[in-house]
Image (cartoon, grey):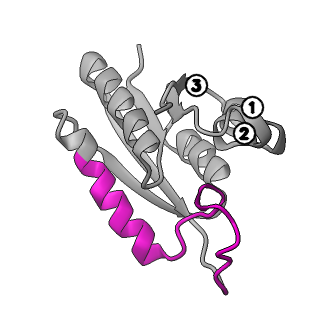
Amino acid sequence: MFNVVVVGADDSPTARRAIEAAAEIVRMSGGVLHLVTAFEIKTQSDSSLPSEFRNLGTDGEAEAALQSLSFVAKNLGVDPVLHLVAGDPSAAIVATADKVNADLIVVGNRGMKGARRVLGSVPNSVAHGANCSVAVIDTTE
Protein backbone atom coordinates (compact mmCIF):
# COMPACT_ATOMS: atom_id res chain seq x y z
CA MET A 1 0.00 0.00 0.00
CA PHE A 2 2.78 2.50 0.87
CA ASN A 3 5.29 2.20 -1.95
CA VAL A 4 6.91 5.62 -1.62
CA VAL A 5 7.56 6.76 1.94
CA VAL A 6 9.14 10.06 2.98
CA VAL A 7 10.56 10.59 6.45
CA GLY A 8 11.84 13.91 7.71
CA ALA A 9 14.59 13.90 10.29
CA ASP A 10 17.14 16.00 12.06
CA ASP A 11 19.97 14.54 14.11
CA SER A 12 17.96 13.80 17.26
CA PRO A 13 17.14 10.52 19.03
CA THR A 14 13.42 11.04 18.41
CA ALA A 15 14.02 11.51 14.67
CA ARG A 16 15.97 8.27 14.61
CA ARG A 17 12.88 6.48 15.95
CA ALA A 18 10.79 7.96 13.13
CA ILE A 19 13.35 6.68 10.61
CA GLU A 20 13.19 3.22 12.17
CA ALA A 21 9.39 3.20 11.87
CA ALA A 22 9.50 4.41 8.26
CA ALA A 23 12.14 1.79 7.38
CA GLU A 24 9.96 -0.95 8.87
CA ILE A 25 7.00 0.20 6.77
CA VAL A 26 9.15 0.19 3.62
CA ARG A 27 10.57 -3.24 4.44
CA MET A 28 7.06 -4.65 4.73
CA SER A 29 5.79 -2.96 1.57
CA GLY A 30 8.90 -3.44 -0.56
CA GLY A 31 8.77 0.27 -1.35
CA VAL A 32 11.27 3.11 -1.45
CA LEU A 33 12.29 5.29 1.49
CA HIS A 34 13.15 8.95 0.97
CA LEU A 35 14.99 10.59 3.88
CA VAL A 36 14.76 14.40 4.10
CA THR A 37 16.93 16.71 6.18
CA ALA A 38 16.41 20.47 6.00
CA PHE A 39 18.85 23.21 6.88
CA GLU A 40 19.02 26.97 7.02
CA ILE A 41 22.23 28.85 6.47
CA LYS A 42 22.66 31.10 9.46
CA THR A 43 24.33 34.46 9.25
CA GLN A 44 24.87 34.55 12.97
CA SER A 45 24.47 32.05 15.77
CA ASP A 46 21.60 32.53 18.18
CA SER A 47 22.59 30.36 21.11
CA SER A 48 19.75 31.81 23.20
CA LEU A 49 17.28 29.56 21.36
CA PRO A 50 16.76 26.02 22.68
CA SER A 51 18.32 23.45 20.36
CA GLU A 52 14.95 22.07 19.26
CA PHE A 53 14.12 25.47 17.73
CA ARG A 54 17.33 25.62 15.69
CA ASN A 55 17.86 23.87 12.36
CA LEU A 56 21.19 22.51 11.28
CA GLY A 57 23.26 25.57 10.49
CA THR A 58 25.13 24.74 7.30
CA ASP A 59 24.78 22.40 4.39
CA GLY A 60 27.98 20.65 5.57
CA GLU A 61 26.51 19.94 9.00
CA ALA A 62 23.24 18.85 7.45
CA GLU A 63 24.98 16.61 4.90
CA ALA A 64 26.95 14.90 7.69
CA ALA A 65 23.76 14.41 9.72
CA LEU A 66 21.91 13.05 6.68
CA GLN A 67 24.66 10.53 5.95
CA SER A 68 24.66 9.44 9.60
CA LEU A 69 20.86 9.14 9.63
CA SER A 70 20.92 6.99 6.51
CA PHE A 71 22.66 4.26 8.51
CA VAL A 72 19.61 3.97 10.79
CA ALA A 73 17.61 2.75 7.79
CA LYS A 74 20.51 0.79 6.27
CA ASN A 75 20.92 -1.14 9.53
CA LEU A 76 17.30 -2.27 9.05
CA GLY A 77 17.97 -3.41 5.48
CA VAL A 78 16.61 -0.32 3.70
CA ASP A 79 18.80 1.84 1.44
CA PRO A 80 17.18 5.30 1.51
CA VAL A 81 17.21 7.99 -1.16
CA LEU A 82 18.69 11.08 0.51
CA HIS A 83 17.36 14.64 0.14
CA LEU A 84 19.21 17.64 1.58
CA VAL A 85 16.92 20.68 1.31
CA ALA A 86 17.54 24.30 2.27
CA GLY A 87 14.64 25.94 4.07
CA ASP A 88 11.90 25.28 6.55
CA PRO A 89 11.76 21.61 7.63
CA SER A 90 7.98 21.27 7.24
CA ALA A 91 7.98 22.80 3.78
CA ALA A 92 10.99 20.68 2.77
CA ILE A 93 9.28 17.45 3.82
CA VAL A 94 6.00 18.29 2.08
CA ALA A 95 7.74 19.53 -1.10
CA THR A 96 9.88 16.39 -1.28
CA ALA A 97 6.83 14.18 -0.77
CA ASP A 98 5.08 15.99 -3.61
CA LYS A 99 8.16 15.73 -5.85
CA VAL A 100 8.49 11.95 -5.39
CA ASN A 101 4.72 11.25 -5.36
CA ALA A 102 4.84 9.86 -1.84
CA ASP A 103 2.07 7.64 -0.53
CA LEU A 104 3.06 8.32 3.08
CA ILE A 105 5.02 10.84 5.14
CA VAL A 106 6.38 9.66 8.50
CA VAL A 107 7.26 12.18 11.20
CA GLY A 108 7.94 11.93 14.91
CA ASN A 109 5.64 13.54 17.43
CA ARG A 110 8.25 15.86 18.96
CA GLY A 111 6.65 19.24 19.51
CA MET A 112 3.08 17.95 19.54
CA LYS A 113 2.60 18.82 23.24
CA GLY A 114 2.92 21.97 25.31
CA ALA A 115 3.88 25.38 23.96
CA ARG A 116 5.35 24.07 20.72
CA ARG A 117 1.97 22.57 19.83
CA VAL A 118 0.43 26.02 20.11
CA LEU A 119 3.38 27.79 18.40
CA GLY A 120 3.51 25.25 15.60
CA SER A 121 5.52 22.10 15.15
CA VAL A 122 6.94 20.20 12.23
CA PRO A 123 4.53 17.25 12.63
CA ASN A 124 1.53 19.57 12.87
CA SER A 125 2.61 21.64 9.86
CA VAL A 126 3.34 18.53 7.80
CA ALA A 127 -0.01 16.96 8.68
CA HIS A 128 -1.84 20.08 7.56
CA GLY A 129 0.21 20.63 4.41
CA ALA A 130 0.63 17.11 3.07
CA ASN A 131 -1.07 15.84 -0.07
CA CYS A 132 -0.75 12.21 1.06
CA SER A 133 -1.20 10.14 4.21
CA VAL A 134 0.83 11.15 7.27
CA ALA A 135 1.88 8.87 10.11
CA VAL A 136 2.87 10.65 13.31
CA ILE A 137 5.04 8.19 15.22
CA ASP A 138 5.28 8.25 19.02
CA THR A 139 8.93 9.07 19.58
CA THR A 140 8.72 10.26 23.18
CA GLU A 141 11.56 9.25 25.40
Residue type at tag 1? His
Residue type at tag 2? Ser
Residue designated by label 1: 128
Q: Nearer the viewer, residue 112 or 43?
A: 112
Q: Nearer the viewer, residue 55 or 125?
A: 55
Q: CA distance from mark 1 to mark 3?
A: 9 Å
Residue 125 spot, x, y in % from top left: 72, 39
Is residue 137 positioned above or below 92 on the image? above
Residue designated by label 2: 125
Q: Is residue 131 left or right of residue 3?
A: right
Q: Is residue 87 left or right of residue 118?
A: left
Q: Residues within 10 Å of mark 1 (few under 14, many from 20)?
A: few
In terms of sequence position, does the residue under pointer 3 or pointer 2 come before the other? Answer: 2
Q: Is residue 45 left or right of residue 28?
A: right
Residue type at tag 3? Val
Residue 96 spot, x, y in % from top left: 54, 47
In terms of sequence position, does the residue under pointer 1 or pointer 3 come before the other? Answer: 1
Q: Is residue 49 left or right of residue 28?
A: right
Does residue 57 appear in the picture of this structure? Answer: yes
Q: Nearer the viewer, residue 95 or 64?
A: 64
Span shown in magenta: 44-71
Q: Residues within 10 Å of mark 3 (few under 14, many from 20)?
A: many
Residue designated by label 3: 134
Q: Residues within 10 Å of mark 2 (few under 14, many from 20)?
A: some
